[in-house]
Image: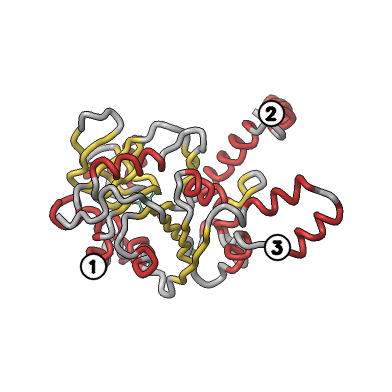
């Protein structure tokens, strides 16, 4: 078993952010979709906060053309900071500085967008020979329901790789990677025997969908180098994980953590709107007024 990564602390997070965001055009013509605000923070900041909150202070973003705003957002902005300092606006100054203090940020460009598996492979030189996390920006996990920290814990116990799973309506499984699993002694942990990317409902081995959080053994890089383009002509991370799940000797076992907490999808316009409404309604500062207005609006319109 190549399981060199077992029990070494996990420090690095990889965030693929090279997608074109075509579902949000024209908003994403000149702005990366990751920068679209969810209430008053760009979606990507929630994801970096989640990584930092799970103790992963080294973040590598896989970007592409048109993504400079991402780098600027996680960097200092001295002009703005000095203007706010002069005004004595400590509150807003803190908000500006928050995003540059979260983690040590690194960036690499994907060049050719050849799929999620290819994006993750671009992280190989930075990650080296240690287990690492992957967080997909379209999935936001509520910070009150920590998932990544649990996945890191499970990886430290079992070694190998760990993916996040969530039960979905069988009609929805064609939008996700899907896992065939066996139970373990721990209620929220399953052993993964097989994975298939976006199966039709009738071919799906379960209703357990991969949501965009992974803790991976570095053996995945060697597997990805050999993984042929799959669904949609793209190199699929799910296919590489299937190779790992099929032969434990390659990179240790693959486990799943079944998540039952709050997840918001920001990859689809309708779900993105729902995420904003839910998160705004729950905010202590904005929620009370917003909910009062929302009740009135619903009563009038529906
Ligand atoms: C990707 C993965 C898929 C996973 C999903 C989670 O698909 O390929 O296995 O279930 O993320 O959000 P995408 O949504 O990028 O098409």
Label annotation for residue 77: 3
- Where, by quadrant of the figure, is residue 284 drawn? top right
**Is 162 in front, or is 205?**
162
Quarter of the image for the C terminus: give it.
Answer: top right
- 286 horizontally vs 16: left or right: right
Query: Residue beneath label 1, please?
Result: 228
- Whole-angstrom CA distance, mark 2 to mark 1, is 50 Å
Mark with earlier residue (2, 3): 3
Q: Does the residue labelled 2 lie within 8 Å of ligand 1?
A: no
Secondary structure of the residue carrying numbered label 1: loop
Task: Name the residue at 53% across, 72% down.
Answer: 65
Distance from the alpha carbon under mark 2 to that under mark 3: 34 Å
Q: Is residue 264 left or right of residue 40?
A: left
Q: 208 left or right of 79? A: left
Q: Can residue 30 be seen in this view?
A: yes
| x 63%, y 49%: residue | 41
Image location of residue 139, percent across then percent down: 46, 46
- Residue 67 coordinates in the image, percent (x, y): 56, 67
Look at the image and tell me in which quarter the N terminus lies: bottom left
Q: As displayed, is residue 224 above or below residue 179?
A: below
Element assignment for label 3: loop
**Camera-nearest label, 1 or 3:** 3
Q: Residue furthest front?
A: 8
Q: Name the residue under label 2.
A: 291
Residue 115, percent from left and from top: 36, 64
Dot 1 or dot 3: first in sequence order is 3
Compare marks 2 and 1 and give the one earlier in the sequence. 1
Q: In front: 131, or 20?
A: 131
Q: Which residue is drawn at 42% across and 58% down?
A: 14
Quarter occupied by residue 152? top left
- Asked which colour scheme the image uses, the reply is secondary structure
């Amino acid at each position: 078993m190549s399981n060199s990564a077992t029990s070494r602390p996990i420090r690095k997070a990889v965030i693929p952010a090279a997608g074109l965001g075509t579902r949000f055009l024209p908003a994403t013509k000149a702005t990366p979709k990751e920068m679209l605000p969810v209430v008053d923070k760009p979606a990507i900041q929630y994801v970096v906060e989640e990584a930092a909150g799970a103790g992963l202070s080294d973040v590598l973003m896989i970007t592409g053309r048109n993504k400079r705003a991402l780098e600027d957002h996680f960097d200092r902005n001295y002009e703005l900071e000095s203007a706010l300092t002069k005004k004595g606006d400590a509150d807003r100054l803190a908000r500006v500085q928050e995003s540059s203090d979260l983690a040590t940020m690194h960036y690499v460009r994907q060049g050719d967008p050849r799929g999620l598996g290819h994006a993750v492979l671009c992280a190989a030189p930075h990650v080296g020979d240690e287990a690492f996390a992957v967080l997909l920006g379209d999935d936001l996990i509520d910070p009150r329901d920590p998932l990544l920290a649990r996945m890191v814990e499970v990886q430290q116990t079992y070694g190998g790789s760990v993916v996040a799973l969530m039960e979905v309506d069988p009609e929805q499984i064609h939008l996700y990677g899907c896992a065939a699993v066996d139970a373990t002694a721990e209620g929220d942990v399953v052993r993964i025997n097989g994975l298939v990317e976006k199966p039709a409902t009738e071919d799906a081995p379960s209703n357990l969908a991969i949501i965009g959080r992974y803790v991976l053994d570095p053996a995945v890089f060697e597997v990805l180098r050999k993984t042929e383009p799959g669904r949609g002509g793209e190199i699929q991370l799910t296919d590489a994980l299937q190779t790992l799940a099929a032969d434990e000797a390659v990179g240790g076992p693959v486990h799943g953590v079944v998540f039952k907490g709050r997840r918001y999808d920001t990859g689809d316009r309708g779900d993105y709107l729902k995420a904003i409404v839910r998160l705004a309604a729950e905010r202590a500062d904005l929620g009370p007024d917003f909910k009062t207005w929302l009740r009135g609006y619903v009563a009038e319109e529906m």
